[in-house]
Image: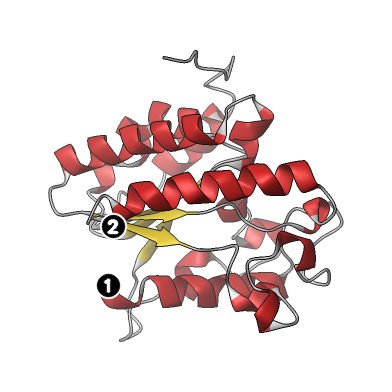
């Protein structure tokens, strides 16, 4: 067994308290993860995720519980507050980059994701779980080590999803909209360079339009 690595699990406590100040909406698809979801909000000059991810009849479908640059360790820590009271019908999990920065290996991240999934299954029998692979970023176009670790993570994550019928593998890295040539989809070194803000990690509004389409496609069977 490995040691947990985030020294301050309450570093985003204020964000969690802000979520808890809102009405508790149940029965939705919770998007839970790090800054790719955190920034899908008007605060960062983007349309809110809740307006982008709708049921096919136009009714509300989703709830954005992204927080900071979080890790799956923190996702587990806040499970009882950010997941359980909301009785979701599905959960979309997007972690990985920050976990690696804290020293987790790709296999350890998947292990913790599996612990999260086990808790969700126990609390919400029949729930659908959507697990996102490693997102492409402009910052890592020339970083072979990062790309190789991401590919390893994706392989282990896909194996976990294939072994569990309630899990769907969401292939962010292979979504055609992130590449100028659809034939390049899946090649981290060929991701588009024009859909990122200055930090080269986070998406512009055009990038979020692409992200929206990815999730509408991935969640099609439950929307």
Quadrant for the C terminus in the image: bottom left
Residue 125 image point, x, y percent:
12, 48
Q: CA distance from mark 2 to mark 1?
A: 9 Å
Q: Are marks 2 and 1 in contact (CB under 8 Å)?
A: yes
Mark carried by residue 133? none
Q: Quadrant of residue 82?
A: top left
**Disc 2, SS:** strand
Residue lying at 57% horizontally and 36% vertically, measured from the top left: 70
Residue 38 at x, y = what percent? 58, 50
- Can residue 176 be seen at all in this image of the molecule? yes
* Residue 177 in the figure: left or right of residue 88: right
Q: Is residue 211 above or below residue 33?
A: below
Q: Quadrant of residue 135?
A: bottom right
- Label 1 Cα neighbours within 10 Å, binned few <14 / some 14-19 / many ≥20: few
**In the depicted view, which residue is nearer to us: 158 or 86?**
158
Residue name at image x 57 percent, y 41 percent:
96
**Nearer to me, 22 or 179:** 179
Relative height, residue 135 to residue 66 (above, below): below
**Secondary structure of residue under mark 1:** helix
Left or right: where 12 falls relative to 178 = left
Disc 2 designates what residue?
Answer: 90
Report if residue 66 is visible in the image: no
Q: Residue at x 58, y 17 (%)?
A: 8
State the residue at coordinates (77%, 70%): 195
Q: Which residue is mark 1?
A: 222
Indicate how the structure is coloured in the image. secondary structure
**In x, y percent, where is residue 130?**
37, 57
Q: Earlier in the sequence, mark 2 or mark 1?
A: 2
């Amino acid at each position: 067994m490995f040691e947990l690595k985030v020294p301050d699990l309450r570093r985003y406590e204020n964000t969690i308290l802000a979520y808890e100040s809102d009405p508790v909406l149940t029965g939705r698809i919770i998007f839970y993860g790090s800054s790719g979801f955190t920034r899908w909000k008007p605060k960062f000059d983007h349309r809110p995720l809740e307006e982008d991810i709708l049921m096919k009849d136009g009714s509300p479908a989703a709830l954005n519980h992204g927080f900071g640059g979080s890790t799956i360790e923190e996702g587990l820590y806040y499970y009882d507050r950010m997941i359980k009271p909301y009785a979701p019908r599905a959960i979309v999990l997007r972690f990985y980059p920050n976990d690696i920065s804290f020293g987790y290996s790709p296999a350890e991240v998947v292990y913790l994701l599996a612990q999260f999934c086990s808790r969700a299954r126990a609390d919400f029998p029949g729930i659908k779980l959507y697990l996102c692979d490693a997102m492409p970023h402009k910052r890592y176009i020339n970083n072979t080590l990062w790309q190789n670790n991401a590919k390893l993570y994706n392989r282990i994550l896909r194996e976990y999803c294939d072994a569990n019928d309630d899990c769907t593998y969401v292939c962010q890295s292979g979504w055609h909209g992130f590449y100028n040539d659809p034939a390049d989809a899946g090649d981290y070194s060929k991701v588009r360079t024009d859909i990122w803000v200055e930090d080269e990690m986070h998406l512009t509004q055009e990038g979020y339009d692409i992200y929206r389409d990815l999730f509408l496609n991935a969640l099609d069977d439950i929307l």
